[in-house]
Image (tube, rainbow, N blue to C red):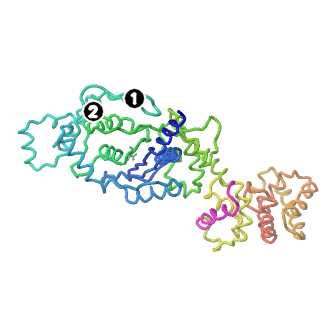
Amino acid sequence: MCHNVIIMESALKTSVRVRFAPSPTGYPHLGNIRTALFNWLFARHHGGKFILRIEDTDITRKVEGAEGVILDSLRWLGLDWDEGPYFQSQRLHYYHEVANRLLKEDYAYLCYCSTERLAVMRREQMRRKQPPKYDGHCRYLTQQEKLQLEASGIIPVVRFKMPLQGETTFHDLIRGQVTFKNSTLDDLVLLKSDGYPTYHLANIVDDHLMAISHVLRADEWLSSTPRHIVLYQALNWQPPRFAHLPMILGPDRAKLSKRHGATTIVDYKEQGYLPQAMINFLALLGWSLDDRTELLSREELIKHFSLERVSKTAAIFNKRKLEWMNGVYLRQLRPEEFIQQAIPFLDRHLPASVKRPLCSNYIRQIMPLLQERAKTLAEIPQLGSFFFLDELQYDPSLFLSSGLDAKTATQAIEIALRRLKIAGVWDANSLEGILRPLAAELNLSAGKFFGLLRVATTGCTAAPPLFQTMAVLGKERCLKRLTTALQRILTLL
Ligand code: GLU
């Protein structure tokens, strides 16, 4: 008994074959990659295979360079594939063969309708508020009409003969039982007049030939599935099992778009998100371990991923959560790793006036302070630019932001400058030893006094801890900045 169970389990393990099948009609966005990730996790969880297939048969919508970006995005996230990439444009003979078989077996027919006729038909349907659907004109051509049209030189398309009655039902692994009336299904085009297959034909032929066991895809394909099932039936092929993943919506519950700050995966990379944070975040868009756990490593995700815990309802994209999570993963990096990741961003985004190459010793001292604060790598140059600039630009009124008047602020900086000039050791502890008692001596709250010094030395009201920051800036830089601050504050008197 026990033995049988083991055999059955291992059979499932070797037979799981899933695919990610993007169309290169644009750069991959969050939704595309979430689909890839769920397929990948499912394959890795079951010890199965993850196959990459580029569905590039719509040549009119093909975007130059998109294929490369898709592959790069998967590589960046570590979603490694076991087979492929297969390109459908290189497999046209398979689709032709199947289309011919369907024609021969009377499951399909040639359609000669012109685009003009189809457009008129569509307009008429819209006017009558009917769903757009091919009216079956060429399905019922007489032998004579067929011969005439053939002789006319018009290049036909191949259409599938959808059953006109009955229903098609399938079991979706997430949605449960789904039923469509066959009368709502179109006589869909299988092969276009340019010789390329449509998505539907190429998709099912390849899922069959590649022995795909489970199709995990976006919800928007749900209505294609009954069409695919009918095709599988006509071909006498066993269909794969289907799981339609919940939609991803913005916080306003509208379909996710650029407006919500969601962009292509490449943009996230450029904005300084870490792949491990993206994986964790995307995994939780529609799947959860329980109702609490937010942080899961790649290994934990593989271990726990299951379709049972994919939600039926839409997932909500929350940019804040992604930023928070990325911050968590940034802080988890070893200091050396953080520096390596940050350097390209500093190089690229620090103002041109900052001398290159950046001094690696100085960077090594700065980075631990920023590692605590940064939510993305791209934020680092901005958060830390004051460490590098010769001259800080800021509004002198910032000196008064903590409620000090200009006279008190002037005196406080003057005396701080005097004390700091004679300081011997310049590290965080000694600076605290000088400045904390000075606040008391000046009868100022630590918050106000340190706030003033922070503006003077960094040009910002929020920055990493003051004494550590001043220690890293060094004595010379700090004294120079305090002197400038004094000149600026005098303008307020
Ligand atoms: N090429 C389709 C897409 O871009 C694939 C859909 C499917 O997985 O069947 O989403």
Pointer 2 local density, CA inside 10 Å: few below 14, some 14–19, many at least 20: few
Q: Write the residue at 70% across / 70% down.
A: 390
Task: Give the camera-side residue of 176 and 196.
Answer: 176
Say left or right for 346 vs 141: right
Ligand 1 under 8 Å from disc 1 Cβ: no
Question: What's the residue at 44%, 41% (across, down)?
Answer: 216
Rendered residue at 45%/31% (across/down): 175
Residue 225, labelled with which disc? Answer: none
Residue with the mark numbered 2 = 126
Q: Main secondary structure of the magenta part?
A: helix
Q: In which quadrant of the rendered image does the C terminus lie?
A: bottom right
- What span is colored magenta in the figure? 331-348
Q: Nearer the viewer, residue 477 or 100?
A: 100
Residue type (three-letter) at the residue carrying disc 1? Val
Location of residue 341 with respect to 218 vertically, above or below: below
Q: Residue at x 55, y 35 (%)?
A: 2
Circle 1 residue: 178
- Quadrant of ligand 1: it is top left
The reply to whether the C-beta atoms of the residues labelled 2 and 1 are less than 8 Å apart is no
Report if residue 332 lies within the magenta region: yes
Q: Is residue 258 visible?
A: no
Which is nearer the N-term, disc 2 or disc 1? 2
